[in-house]
Amino acid sequence: MNLNCKKALYVPLKSAKLLAFSSLLWWSSEAFAQQQVIRLPQKSITLQEVFQQIEKQTNLSVDYKKNDVTKKKVNVAGGNIQEVLNKALQGTGLRFRFEGQHIIISPAEKKSKNAGEPKKVIGKILDNNGEPVIGGTVRVKGTTTGTITDFNGNFTLDAKIDDILEISYIGYTTKNIKVGNQDMLTVNLEEDTQKLDEVVVVGYGTSTKRSLIASVSKV
């Protein structure tokens, strides 16, 4: 009975020691990174060269994938490890973290757009022949927010991810497009054959919209 009790107590105690040791390693690496000064040459160098200098001047190793690191040169003055890495990785889309005696370089997590946050949507409206639709209406469905296309069929509009864009033009079938994560939209409208075949009364007889070419007034 006593042996079983000792065994039961031993396992969690061992795990606790390992956890404390791991935490100590992480803390010591963090503290070391804030104290250890890295000296770099006064010139533009690549990220790989920055990592090499860190490994050369410390007992830490820098782990990264070559495909994630560009060959673009950076200007980084000396400083502690954290300062050097923060400046070197600025604008690269990469981040760093400490794991024991290792510095792990990895792509930063992309922040997803909040569904309730408006974003700029750019689009182009074309007809079924691939020609730009001039003066087409683009409206956020259920709202008064909208715009019209320019001479090249282009439009710009602020909309949310969950919004539905209602795209319409005289003689064409109205289309509803969900914004989603797209920042650039290309929409092809199709002719509404029923509306094109409607009879229009003109001064000298009748004609259909499809065959009507001259500019006329309609009552």
Image: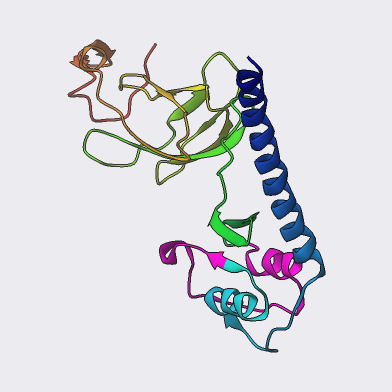
Residue drawn at (30%, 28%) of the image: 189
Image x and y of residue 145, in percent: 60, 24
How many numbered marks, from 0 up?
Answer: 0
Q: Is residue 174 left or right of residue 113?
A: left
Image x and y of residue 188, in percent: 30, 32
Span highlighted in magenta in the image? 62-91
Can you say which quadrant of the picture contains the C terminus?
A: top left
Image x and y of residue 95, in percent: 61, 56
Residue drawn at (46%, 37%) of the image: 149
Splitting the image into 4 quarters, where does residue 169 fall?
top left
Residue drawn at (32%, 29%) of the image: 215
Q: Judge by depth and name the residue closer to the eye, 178 or 101.
A: 101
Q: Is residue 77 above or below residue 64?
A: below
Q: Judge by depth and name the residue closer to the eye, 114 or 190.
A: 114
Q: In the image as oriented, which residue stretches furthest toward the bottom?
A: 42
Q: Is residue 207 above or below residue 102?
A: above
Splitting the image into 4 quarters, where does residue 112 fall?
top right
Image x and y of residue 76, in percent: 69, 77
Splitting the image into 4 quarters, where does residue 129 fall?
top left
Is residue 65 one of those drawn in magenta? yes
